[in-house]
Amino acid sequence: MGTFLTITQDAERESATVDTLLTSVTSQTGRHLKFVEWVKRAWLDIQRSRADWLWMRGEFEDVALSVGTGRYTATALGLTRWARWIVAKDTYYIYDPDIGNSDEGALLWMPWNEFRRTYERGSQTNNKPAHFSISPAGEFCVGPAPDKAYPLSGEYRKSPQTLSANGDEPECPERFHTAISDRANILMSQHDEAEMHIQTNKERYGATMGEMRRDQLPQIVNGAAPLA
């Protein structure tokens, strides 16, 4: 199990620039503190390097919509670390609570201008939502506005995870945790202006990131829906 502490220890060990390995990521000073910050930054860099890492998809199930309300913020739906909505086919589902799961069906995407013209202009009647769209303010919108508390399920993109405590575990598969320590040592080498170490760490980092991209990005399939 790779944790913030063990990954930082690995980075220090690989660097061969400290006499003893740190025993905690908190309350550090000097060179140890720099490694803590390099590992933290490395993990953020990796997460931000792609917008479609599989491990950064969040899910929610059976969140009740409010009668008469067509727009929802991530907070209103109880989502944590929300970054953006996924606009793709068969991503959001609702069902009639009086019927149950057997009624579950996907909401259809509608571009914002068309959605607003269809569901937010003129006289409207609450009913079972059939479409979804995303407002310019980032709200998740359903149309028509619900006439019942329909349960909504779906997915969203999570914001990057920040490591802070010794036991914090990066959310990507453990076999790719070495990319974090390698990236941290690239940052270390740049700080120290150690060109030889930069090249070595870049080669290791590149190999692991290549494997992670092959394993942790959506696969392209002919005839599939647009990738999230």
Image (spheres, rainbow, N blue to C red):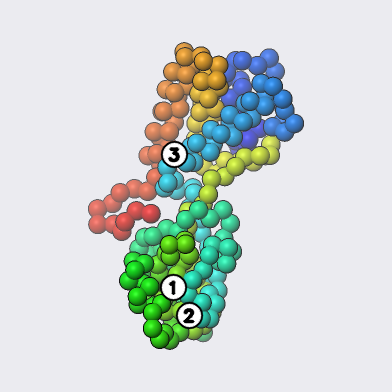
Image quarter of residue 224: bottom left
Q: Is residue 117 left or right of residue 173?
A: left
Q: Is residue 180 above or below residue 15?
A: below
Q: Disc 2 to disc 3, how far (Cα)? A: 38 Å
Q: How many marks?
A: 3
Q: Is residue 212 left or right of residue 16?
A: left
Give the residue type at disc 1.
Val
**In what element is the residue under mark 2?**
loop
Which of the two residues, 209 or 138, is positioned nearer the viewer here?
Answer: 138
| Numbered label attached to residue 142 | 1
Give the residue type at disc 3.
Ser
Residue 72 image offset from top left, x and y in percent:
51, 68
Which of the two residues, 69 or 173, is positioned nearer the viewer here?
Answer: 69
Residue at mark 3? 49
Q: Is residue 228 visible?
A: yes
Q: Is residue 148 left or right of residue 110?
A: right
Quick one: label 2, few (<14), some, or many (20+) residues within 10 Å?
A: many
Quick one: label 3, few (<14), some, or many (20+) residues within 10 Å?
A: few
Image quarter of residue 113: bottom left
Give the residue type at disc 2.
Pro
Q: In this view, which residue lies farthest toward the right?
A: 27
Residue 15 image offset from top left, x and y in percent:
57, 18
Q: Is residue 221 above or below residue 147?
A: above
Q: Is residue 93 visible?
A: no
Between discs 2 and 3, the one toward the N terminus? 3
| Quadrant location of the N terminus in the rendered image | top right
Which of the two residues, 157 or 106, is positioned nearer the viewer here?
Answer: 157
| Tag 1 near tag 2, CB within 8 Å | yes
Residue that appears at 40% across and 34% down: 211
**In what element is the residue under mark 3?**
loop
Q: In this view, which residue lies farthest toward the left?
A: 222
Residue at mark 2? 146
